[in-house]
Image (spheres, grey):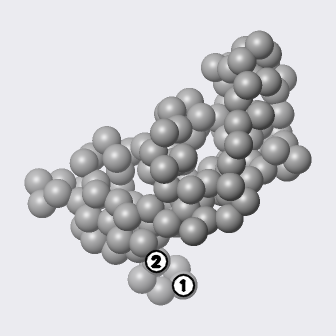
Amino acid sequence: MSMMGDPNYDLGRRLSPSEIKLMSDNELLYSYTTIEVNNFSFPDKIIYPSIACYSDEVTTVYPLTGKAVLLGSEYIVARNQGCKMDLVGGTLIPFKLKNEKVGLTSKNWESYKNRAFPTSVD
């Protein structure tokens, strides 16, 4: 929790599936990122899948296949487990820069925040 930053809502935007696939682990971890997955499927060799799904209001299950909305950290773990995911899109709200922990220097932050991103997911 100590690595969490203050959200910079002014730079918040929608993400396309191709943008999500291009994001580094640091970009996913050091931001508020949600990712909508239409279908996911873990390999049969995975005993403990990492994606939690609600079966009712209070009970969560960890299925080998299903649909979900993930955080950036959940996406990284599932991807590392070999999960096949059909990405629909996502939302990114970056942290306000207070220090260099985020892996972005002030020099390359300008080029990062000025990248062109679509406003909707097609």
Q: Residue furthest left?
A: 45
Residue holding disc 1: 57
Viewer-closest of 111 and 83 = 111
Q: Residue furthest bottom?
A: 56
Count of marks, rendered view: 2
Tell me if 27 is positioned left or right of 5 in this view. left
Instruction: Quarter of the image for the C terminus: give it.
Output: bottom right
Are the residues flagged by discs 1 and 2 in contact, CB closer than 8 Å? yes
**Quarter occupied by residue 104:** top right
Give the residue type at disc 1: Glu
Label 2: state its secondary structure: strand
Viewer-closest of 49 and 117 = 117
Residue at (38, 45) in percent of width and height: 77
* Residue 35 image position (x, y, % from top left): 54, 59
Is residue 118 visible to us here? Answer: yes
Instruction: Quarter of the image for the N terminus: give it.
Output: top right
* Residue 68 image position (x, y, % from top left): 46, 69
Give the residue type at disc 2: Tyr
CA–CA distance in space, label 1 to label 2 = 7 Å
Viewer-closest of 102 and 19 = 19
Disc ID at residue 40: none
Q: Is residue 31 above or below residue 54?
A: above
Label 1: state its secondary structure: loop
Residue at (49, 66) in percent of width and height: 88
* Residue 39 image position (x, y, % from top left): 35, 71
Q: Is residue 63 above or below residue 85?
A: below
Q: Is residue 80 above or below residue 97?
A: below
Residue holding disc 2: 54
Label 2: few (<14), some or many (≥20) within 10 Å? few
Tell me if 107 is positioned left or right of 77 in this view. right
Tell me if 70 is positioned left or right of 76 in this view. right
